[in-house]
Amino acid sequence: MEAFLAEAARTFGFSYAIQSIPDLAAELDAAGDAFACARLTPAERARFATLRVPKRRAEWLAGRLAAKAAFARHAAAGTAPAEVSILSRPSRAPFIVEAPGLRLSISHCQDYAVAVVAAFDIGVDVERTEARPAVLARAILCPDEERLLEHVCGCPAEVDAMVTRFWSRKEAVAKFLHLGGSLDFRCINTAGDLACLPGLAQAGVRLLSAPYDGYWISLAL
Protein backbone atom coordinates (compact mmCIF):
# COMPACT_ATOMS: atom_id res chain seq x y z
CA MET A 1 0.00 0.00 0.00
CA GLU A 2 2.82 2.37 0.87
CA ALA A 3 4.59 1.68 -2.44
CA PHE A 4 1.38 2.21 -4.44
CA LEU A 5 0.62 5.54 -2.76
CA ALA A 6 4.23 6.73 -2.93
CA GLU A 7 4.48 6.15 -6.67
CA ALA A 8 1.08 7.75 -7.36
CA ALA A 9 2.01 10.72 -5.16
CA ARG A 10 5.24 11.27 -7.11
CA THR A 11 3.39 11.03 -10.42
CA PHE A 12 0.39 13.22 -9.64
CA GLY A 13 1.61 15.50 -6.86
CA PHE A 14 -0.44 14.78 -3.76
CA SER A 15 0.44 13.93 -0.16
CA TYR A 16 -0.72 10.93 1.84
CA ALA A 17 -0.41 9.17 5.19
CA ILE A 18 -1.31 5.72 6.50
CA GLN A 19 -2.32 5.02 10.10
CA SER A 20 -2.53 1.58 11.72
CA ILE A 21 -5.91 1.31 13.44
CA PRO A 22 -4.95 -1.63 15.74
CA ASP A 23 -1.86 0.27 16.94
CA LEU A 24 -3.95 3.35 17.63
CA ALA A 25 -6.62 1.31 19.43
CA ALA A 26 -3.88 -0.09 21.68
CA GLU A 27 -2.68 3.45 22.47
CA LEU A 28 -6.23 4.47 23.37
CA ASP A 29 -6.63 1.43 25.63
CA ALA A 30 -3.36 2.20 27.39
CA ALA A 31 -3.57 5.99 27.73
CA GLY A 32 -7.30 6.66 27.54
CA ASP A 33 -8.87 9.75 26.04
CA ALA A 34 -5.87 11.87 27.04
CA PHE A 35 -3.97 10.32 24.13
CA ALA A 36 -6.61 11.52 21.67
CA CYS A 37 -7.27 14.91 23.25
CA ALA A 38 -3.60 15.85 23.06
CA ARG A 39 -3.79 15.47 19.28
CA LEU A 40 -7.16 17.07 18.61
CA THR A 41 -8.45 20.63 18.44
CA PRO A 42 -11.36 21.67 20.70
CA ALA A 43 -13.89 21.18 17.88
CA GLU A 44 -12.50 17.72 17.15
CA ARG A 45 -12.50 16.80 20.84
CA ALA A 46 -16.19 17.68 21.00
CA ARG A 47 -16.89 15.31 18.10
CA PHE A 48 -14.70 12.56 19.56
CA ALA A 49 -16.60 12.80 22.85
CA THR A 50 -19.84 11.83 21.08
CA LEU A 51 -18.37 8.52 19.87
CA ARG A 52 -19.08 5.62 22.22
CA VAL A 53 -18.17 2.42 20.34
CA PRO A 54 -14.43 1.66 20.76
CA LYS A 55 -14.03 0.45 17.16
CA ARG A 56 -15.64 3.60 15.76
CA ARG A 57 -13.55 5.83 18.07
CA ALA A 58 -10.31 4.21 16.87
CA GLU A 59 -11.33 4.43 13.20
CA TRP A 60 -12.39 8.08 13.45
CA LEU A 61 -9.23 9.08 15.31
CA ALA A 62 -7.00 7.14 12.92
CA GLY A 63 -8.57 8.92 9.95
CA ARG A 64 -8.05 12.35 11.55
CA LEU A 65 -4.44 11.64 12.49
CA ALA A 66 -3.71 10.33 8.99
CA ALA A 67 -5.27 13.50 7.53
CA LYS A 68 -3.17 15.73 9.80
CA ALA A 69 -0.01 13.84 8.84
CA ALA A 70 -0.84 14.10 5.12
CA PHE A 71 -1.46 17.83 5.48
CA ALA A 72 1.85 18.31 7.30
CA ARG A 73 3.59 16.56 4.41
CA HIS A 74 1.76 18.70 1.88
CA ALA A 75 2.59 21.93 3.72
CA ALA A 76 6.18 20.77 4.29
CA ALA A 77 5.90 22.17 7.80
CA GLY A 78 6.27 20.72 11.27
CA THR A 79 2.63 21.26 12.13
CA ALA A 80 1.55 19.62 15.38
CA PRO A 81 -1.63 17.52 15.13
CA ALA A 82 -3.44 19.68 17.69
CA GLU A 83 -2.85 22.75 15.48
CA VAL A 84 -4.82 21.36 12.55
CA SER A 85 -8.59 20.87 12.64
CA ILE A 86 -10.27 18.29 10.39
CA LEU A 87 -14.03 18.83 10.32
CA SER A 88 -16.86 17.64 8.06
CA ARG A 89 -19.04 19.56 5.64
CA PRO A 90 -22.83 19.00 5.53
CA SER A 91 -22.13 16.41 2.80
CA ARG A 92 -19.91 14.62 5.39
CA ALA A 93 -16.85 15.28 3.24
CA PRO A 94 -13.87 16.10 5.47
CA PHE A 95 -11.96 19.37 5.08
CA ILE A 96 -8.98 21.12 6.63
CA VAL A 97 -10.16 24.24 8.48
CA GLU A 98 -6.78 25.93 8.14
CA ALA A 99 -6.60 25.22 4.38
CA PRO A 100 -10.18 24.87 3.05
CA GLY A 101 -8.99 25.24 -0.56
CA LEU A 102 -7.16 21.92 -0.41
CA ARG A 103 -8.95 18.66 -1.14
CA LEU A 104 -8.87 15.97 1.51
CA SER A 105 -10.12 12.40 1.31
CA ILE A 106 -10.08 9.82 4.11
CA SER A 107 -10.79 6.08 4.10
CA HIS A 108 -10.56 3.42 6.79
CA CYS A 109 -11.14 -0.31 6.72
CA GLN A 110 -10.29 -2.86 9.43
CA ASP A 111 -6.55 -2.33 9.96
CA TYR A 112 -5.80 0.86 8.04
CA ALA A 113 -6.80 4.50 7.77
CA VAL A 114 -5.53 6.36 4.71
CA ALA A 115 -5.72 10.08 3.94
CA VAL A 116 -4.72 12.03 0.83
CA VAL A 117 -4.35 15.80 0.44
CA ALA A 118 -4.07 17.61 -2.88
CA ALA A 119 -4.59 20.95 -4.59
CA PHE A 120 -6.96 19.18 -7.00
CA ASP A 121 -9.99 16.88 -6.76
CA ILE A 122 -9.09 13.48 -5.32
CA GLY A 123 -10.75 10.52 -3.63
CA VAL A 124 -9.30 7.46 -1.88
CA ASP A 125 -10.92 4.25 -0.68
CA VAL A 126 -9.65 1.08 0.99
CA GLU A 127 -11.77 -2.08 1.12
CA ARG A 128 -11.04 -5.51 2.55
CA THR A 129 -11.40 -8.33 0.02
CA GLU A 130 -14.18 -10.60 1.23
CA ALA A 131 -17.24 -12.44 -0.02
CA ARG A 132 -20.16 -10.12 -0.70
CA PRO A 133 -23.78 -11.11 -1.40
CA ALA A 134 -24.68 -11.52 -5.06
CA VAL A 135 -27.45 -8.99 -4.55
CA LEU A 136 -24.83 -6.36 -3.71
CA ALA A 137 -22.94 -7.01 -6.94
CA ARG A 138 -26.17 -6.66 -8.91
CA ALA A 139 -26.90 -3.40 -7.10
CA ILE A 140 -23.57 -1.70 -7.85
CA LEU A 141 -22.22 -3.10 -11.13
CA CYS A 142 -22.80 -1.58 -14.55
CA PRO A 143 -23.13 -3.84 -17.66
CA ASP A 144 -19.43 -3.57 -18.62
CA GLU A 145 -18.37 -4.59 -15.10
CA GLU A 146 -20.87 -7.47 -15.07
CA ARG A 147 -19.37 -8.79 -18.30
CA LEU A 148 -15.89 -8.75 -16.76
CA LEU A 149 -17.21 -10.55 -13.69
CA GLU A 150 -18.71 -13.31 -15.86
CA HIS A 151 -15.20 -14.32 -16.96
CA VAL A 152 -14.20 -15.29 -13.39
CA CYS A 153 -17.50 -16.72 -12.15
CA GLY A 154 -15.95 -20.17 -11.78
CA CYS A 155 -13.49 -18.94 -9.15
CA PRO A 156 -15.05 -17.52 -5.95
CA ALA A 157 -11.79 -15.90 -4.83
CA GLU A 158 -11.47 -14.00 -8.11
CA VAL A 159 -15.11 -12.96 -7.93
CA ASP A 160 -14.59 -11.57 -4.42
CA ALA A 161 -11.45 -9.72 -5.52
CA MET A 162 -13.10 -8.21 -8.60
CA VAL A 163 -16.28 -7.09 -6.82
CA THR A 164 -14.16 -5.56 -4.05
CA ARG A 165 -12.03 -3.76 -6.63
CA PHE A 166 -15.11 -2.30 -8.32
CA TRP A 167 -16.60 -1.32 -4.94
CA SER A 168 -13.38 0.44 -3.93
CA ARG A 169 -13.15 2.33 -7.21
CA LYS A 170 -16.78 3.49 -7.01
CA GLU A 171 -16.33 4.66 -3.43
CA ALA A 172 -13.23 6.62 -4.47
CA VAL A 173 -15.20 8.28 -7.28
CA ALA A 174 -18.05 9.15 -4.89
CA LYS A 175 -15.54 10.84 -2.58
CA PHE A 176 -13.93 12.62 -5.54
CA LEU A 177 -17.35 14.07 -6.40
CA HIS A 178 -18.39 14.75 -2.78
CA LEU A 179 -21.61 12.86 -3.48
CA GLY A 180 -21.22 10.00 -1.03
CA GLY A 181 -24.24 7.72 -0.67
CA SER A 182 -26.39 9.81 -3.01
CA LEU A 183 -24.58 8.42 -6.08
CA ASP A 184 -26.07 5.43 -7.92
CA PHE A 185 -23.06 3.12 -8.23
CA ARG A 186 -24.59 1.38 -11.25
CA CYS A 187 -24.14 4.64 -13.19
CA ILE A 188 -20.36 4.63 -12.60
CA ASN A 189 -18.41 2.52 -15.08
CA THR A 190 -15.06 1.63 -13.50
CA ALA A 191 -14.16 -1.21 -15.85
CA GLY A 192 -11.33 0.82 -17.39
CA ASP A 193 -8.75 3.36 -16.27
CA LEU A 194 -11.27 6.18 -16.61
CA ALA A 195 -14.54 6.16 -14.69
CA CYS A 196 -17.40 7.15 -16.97
CA LEU A 197 -20.18 9.14 -15.33
CA PRO A 198 -23.07 9.84 -17.72
CA GLY A 199 -24.85 13.11 -17.12
CA LEU A 200 -22.15 14.61 -14.92
CA ALA A 201 -19.78 17.42 -15.84
CA GLN A 202 -16.75 15.17 -15.58
CA ALA A 203 -16.36 13.20 -18.81
CA GLY A 204 -14.08 10.81 -16.99
CA VAL A 205 -12.15 10.40 -13.76
CA ARG A 206 -8.74 8.73 -13.73
CA LEU A 207 -8.66 5.56 -11.65
CA LEU A 208 -5.73 3.79 -10.01
CA SER A 209 -6.17 0.57 -8.01
CA ALA A 210 -3.93 -2.03 -6.39
CA PRO A 211 -4.39 -5.10 -4.16
CA TYR A 212 -2.49 -5.34 -0.91
CA ASP A 213 -2.52 -8.15 1.66
CA GLY A 214 -6.23 -8.85 1.46
CA TYR A 215 -7.26 -5.29 0.62
CA TRP A 216 -7.92 -3.16 -2.44
CA ILE A 217 -6.95 0.51 -2.45
CA SER A 218 -8.21 2.90 -5.13
CA LEU A 219 -7.61 6.51 -6.10
CA ALA A 220 -9.83 8.76 -8.20
CA LEU A 221 -8.13 11.85 -9.63
Image (cartoon, rainbow, N blue to C red):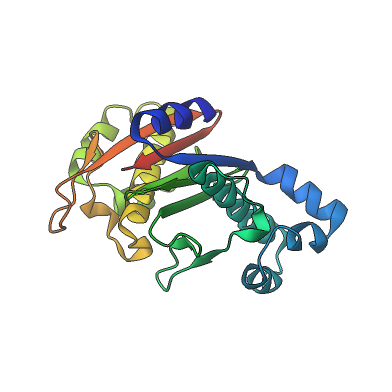
Q: Residue at x 37, y 63 (%)?
A: 181
Residue at x-position 42% and y-position 33%:
9
**Camera sees residue 120:** yes
Which residue is nearer to you in this view: 183 or 107?
107
**Residue visible at 63% across and 59% down in the picture:** 83
Q: Nearer the viewer, residue 106 or 214?
A: 106
Q: Quadrant of residue 148?
A: top left
Name the residue furthest front.
77
Q: Is residue 89 above or below residue 24?
A: below
Q: Residue furthest right?
A: 30
In terms of image quadrants, where is residue 90?
bottom left
Left of 102 or right of it: where is 197? left
Q: Is residue 210 left or right of residue 112?
A: left
Percent of width and height locating residue 50: 67, 74
Foreground of the two, 192 or 220: 220
Horizontal relation, residue 143 to residue 29: left or right: left
Residue 132 seen: no
